[in-house]
Image (tube, grey):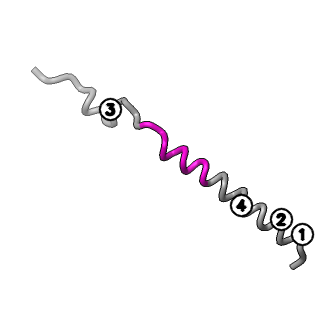
Amino acid sequence: MNTTAIVIMVVTMLSVTAVTGYFFMKVLKTPPNPEPDSFDENDEVPR
């Protein structure tokens, strides 16, 4: 393997790792949804 191939491989691996890390942290930092998770919580109370 020549030097050019090693450089391209390392740059590609680092860029994929950086993009994956960015979106992973974005998912972790997203605040929870304030809406209820179930339609059961939206039902009216029976009388």
| Residues at circles 1 and 2 in contact by the CB criterion of under 8 Å | yes
> Dot 1 corresponds to which residue?
4
Of the residues tagged 2 and 3, which is closer to the observer?
2
Task: Say if mark 2 contacts mark 4, CB within 8 Å.
Answer: no
Q: Tell which circle, 2 or 3, labels the residue nearer the N-terminal end.
A: 2
Q: Secondary structure at mark 1?
A: helix
Q: Amino acid at mark 4?
A: Leu
Q: Is residue 25 magenta?
A: yes
Q: What residue is pinned by disc 2?
A: 8
Give the alpha-carbon distance from disc 1 to disc 3, as whole Å: 54 Å
- Give, as a single range, the part of the protein colored magenta: 21-31
- Residue 4 location, x and y as percent? 89, 69
Q: CA distance from mark 4 to mark 1?
A: 15 Å
Q: CA distance from mark 4 to mark 3?
A: 39 Å
Q: Nearer the viewer, mark 4 or mark 3?
A: 4
Residue 14 is marked as: 4
* Residue under pointer 3: 36
Residue 15's image quarter?
bottom right
Quarter of the figure that contains the N terminus: bottom right
Q: Are marks 2 and 3 in contact (CB under 8 Å)?
A: no
Circle 3 SS class = loop
